[in-house]
Amino acid sequence: GENVEQHPSTLSVQEGDSAVIKCTYSDSASNYFPWYKQELGKGPQLIIDIRSNVGEKKDQRIAVTLNKTAKHFSLHITETQPEDSAVYFCAASMGQFYFGTGTSLTVIP
Amino acid sequence: NAGVTQTPKFQVLKTGQSMTLQCAQDMNHNSMYWYRQDPGMGLRLIYYSASEGTTDKGEVPNGYNVSRLNKREFSLRLESAAPSQTSVYFCASDSTQGNTEAFFGQGTRLTVV
């Protein structure tokens, strides 16, 4: 099956700085790559996704890049705010989601 | 608009007891999933149902059973709970089996003592 690795496991940034989370996947058949944000005590919620026919996608302060050749994709959050503090999960899918192990992001005011 | 609703939110079981986690979605989704979340291990798929009337094993199915009662409801049963099943359980649903946004419930925190 697919294997998704996510780094770093924890990340602290100053408010206003950028945060980058990286994931790699193993199966070239994966074609859908969502990112989820999980706040304390809640279920994960989709924040952005990208498909294998697209290299980059942006939504306000959040962007995702995908390198199919290298089998890696990254989440970029610019101008971080305290409310961005949460656990972020990447996933790769070819009809079934395989999740990374999560990154706990802390934005320090 | 409730989305995905899970019950209960918290549960403590003794080793060997059984229980059923309930999940219902109101988005007319075809596919439903049960995940468990453990520290440092992300979300691991227990069972899924691609459509009403079908269920399949995921990555960690041992010790669990599921029932897709109808299009809305997908339950997870622990027949004889073990401490290793202490975890947070999430139900999720999507419209096209892993090709679109999955919506998650609020989770069930289960402790087996």
Image (cartoon, coloured by chain):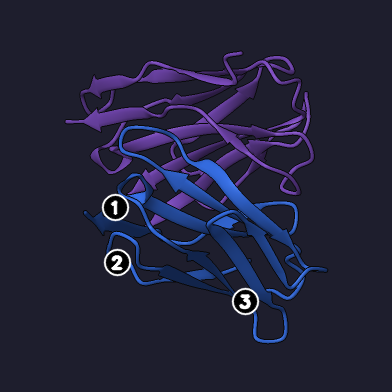
Residue, disc 2: A11
Question: Which colour denotes chain B?
Answer: purple
Residue sitting at 79 percent across and 40 percent down? Answer: B96
Q: Quadrant of residue B94?
A: top right
Left or right: B108, with B23 as reference point: left
Mark 2 lies on a secondary structure that is: strand
| Residues at marks 1 and 2, CA–CA distance in whole angstroms | 16 Å
Closer to us: A109 or B61: A109
Label 2 crowding class (10 Å Cα cut-off): few <14, some 14-19, many 20+?
some
B74 w.r.t. A99: above or below: above
| Residues at marks 3 and 2, CA–CA distance in whole angstroms | 24 Å
Residue sitting at 41 percent across and 29 percent down? Answer: B107
Whether residue B40 is visible to the viewer of this picture, yes or no, is no
Residue A90 coordinates in the image, percent (x, y) = 53, 59
Q: Amino acid at mark 3?
A: Ser
Whether residue A42 is visible to the viewer of this picture, yes or no, is yes
Residue, disc 3: A26
Determine if marks 1 and 2 fall on one subunit: no
Question: Which quarter shows the N terminus of chain A?
Answer: bottom right
Determine if marks 1 and 3 fall on one subunit: no
- Mark 1 or 2, closer to the camera: 2
Parent chain of label 1: B
Tell me which label, 3 or 2, sits earlier in the chain. Answer: 2
Parent chain of label 3: A
Residue B83 coordinates in the image, percent (x, y) = 24, 39
Q: Amino acid at mark 1?
A: Pro
Question: Which colour denotes chain A?
Answer: blue
Mark 3 lies on a secondary structure that is: loop
Q: Which mark is residue B39?
A: 1
| Residues at marks 1 and 3, CA–CA distance in whole angstroms | 23 Å
